[in-house]
Amino acid sequence: MMTKSNKESPIIIIRYKAMSLLARREHSFFELSQKLTERFPENIEIVGGVVAALKNQNLQSDKRFSEMLVATRTRRGYGPVRIQLELKQRGVKIDLIKLALTESDADWFQLAKMAMKKKYGLSECDQFDDMVKRKNFLKYRGFKSDHIAACFN
């Protein structure tokens, strides 16, 4: 096992840490660069080179990362707006975000209904305040207004 006390090249140590992070889960290029820069602030140039090399070797992929995140978030009941925002915050380009959301084949209307059912059960909402609360919940979860409206029809 490598430790900081090893007299190894910083490239080897940084690559080992990057591979260790990628072995646990996918990371975006930006996210991986950020984590490694925080860990090795004295070797920022090397970090950039290592992450770029991993991307060139297809060991790091923003496409795979976005597909993984979309799948994970849809299983947890989040909508496309929130997922898109999260991917943007993690440095994924908009074209990859749209591709991942399109390829997911998620039925956002059904997911919105399931999220509301999980949170509120089968109880009817006959009070205006209750309806507003439910709509705000779905909006917070990242569903668009047409997905939310379909839940109340």
Image (cartoon, grey):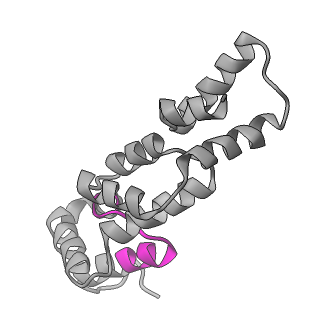
Residue 1, horizontal then vertical, whole percent: 47, 88
Quarter of the image for residue 61 reads bottom left
Residue 3 in the image, given as x and y percentages of width and height: 42, 80
Is any atom of residue 22 visible in this view? yes
Question: Which of 150/91 is in front?
Answer: 150
Quadrant where the C terminus is found in the figure: top right
Closest to the observer, 19 or 58: 58
Image position of 42 (left or right of 122): left
Q: Residue furthest right?
A: 123
Q: In the image, is 84 to the left or to the right of 147?
A: left
Q: Main secondary structure of the magenta part?
A: helix
Residue projecting furthest to the top: 128
Q: Position of residue 146 (x, y in %)?
A: 50, 33
Residue drawn at point x = 60 percent, y = 24 percent = 136
Queried whether the magenta region covers residue 28, the answer comes back as: yes
Q: What segment is highlighted magenta in the picture? A: 17-31
The total of numbered circles placed on residues is 0
Question: Which picture quadrant has residue 40?
Answer: bottom left
Q: Residue at x 45, y 48 (%)?
A: 83
Identified at 30% across, 80% down, the residue is 15
**Membership of 74 in magenta stretch:** no
